[in-house]
Image (spheres, grey):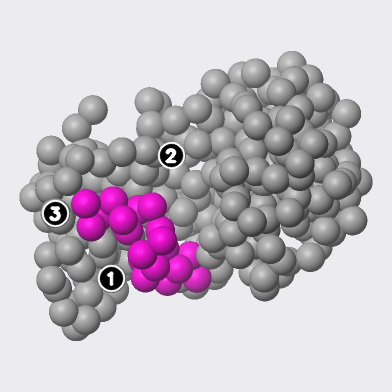
Amino acid sequence: MKIGIIGAGAWGTALANIAAHSGNQVVLWAYDDKDEINQKHRNSRLPGVVISHEITATDKISDISGTDGWLIVTPTAFFKDMIKKARPFWKKQPIIICSKGIEPKSNQLLSDVVSEVIPGSEKYIGILSGPQFAGEAARGKPTGSTIAGSPKVRVFAHKALNSIYLEDTSDINGVQICGAGKNAIAILLGYLDAMGAGENERALNLTLAWREIIQFGRLFGAKMDTFNMLCGVGDLFLTASSKTSRNYSAGVSIGKKEKLSGTIEGLAALKWIIKTSRSNKLNLKNLENFYESNSSFFKG
């Protein structure tokens, strides 16, 4: 197959390598670094990783029109604009969203953004989410994800990414709630560590906060089994326990009252979770207390 990947950051490039190692040709849309990828088979965002010769980088979004399906790996802050640019070239291919979080301006789930921008795309949308750090995945170390969507979309995903472990669900909303929730909790856990919390307190807060995310997921019709999948507890374990996680590191910075920089998906996610829970009279005490005590970091 020929796979179109939109976004050549660390995770987008890692997915491109996975798709190529799965026996596919890959068209990788890159905002920049096109020449580095095509000529040197490197990407500065993934130091030390050799990029497959089956990957062709391009800065022309029209080049994805002839592919069998898309993987969207764009930061949430630019997600909607990117979908608008890609819309004229959609030919009813599967659209698998690999970004995690919510669209910060509209507070929409990313699947809702796609279905709004590309009318008629609902049954072609999938969500890929799991516990992965890009560097390890790009080097071929064992990894796995949850793929959500219709049977047709999931079949495409298994063909596109057959070199990794994939588990199936139809619960598109639940998988997205897991992705947003684990990022928010990772910030909380980083904060607790910066504040000198003990291991007991850390485990207590992790459990209570994840229980709140499960309650929150019910607002969107999420299935309870989804929270026990790779997109749920698997990704939660990785993101909330590793100091290389951006969201965990952001929590440490909040605890130290340091200025935050870069894209931190969990900030927008937690703000959205709190706002939505309040409007639905849902009491998320643990997350609410953390949000209120650090409200200055969630402005804007």
- Marks 2 and 1, how far apart in space? 21 Å
Q: Which corner quadrant of the image does residue 90 belong to?
A: top right
Magenta residue check for 97: no
Labels 2 and 3: the sequence-earlier one: 2
Q: Magenta region's main secondary structure?
A: helix
Please rate how many residues cluster around mark 1, counting C-alpha atoms within 10 Å: few if below 14, some from 14 to 19, many from 20: many
Instruction: Point out which mark residue 256 bears.
Output: 3
- Residue at screen point 61% across, 19% down: 84
Q: Residue at x 79, y 36 (%)?
A: 38
- Residue at the limit of the structure toward the left, as seen here: 293
**CA separation in Å, label 3 and label 1:** 20 Å
At which x and y percent is residue 287? 21, 56
Residue 94: x and y in percent read 76, 40
Magenta part of the chain? 234-253
| Residue matched to label 1 | 206
Quarter residue 199 falls in: bottom left
In this orientation, which residue lies closer to the viewer: 112 or 90? 90
Q: Residue at x 8, y 50 (%)?
A: 293
Q: How many marks?
A: 3
Check disc 1 and give the amino acid type.
Leu
Residue 125 visible in the snapshot:
no
**Pointer 2 residue:** 102
Name the element at disc 2: strand
3 vs 1, front mark = 3
Image quarter of residue 102: top left
The kind of secondary structure element at disc 1 is helix
Badges 2 and 3: C-beta atoms under 8 Å apart? no
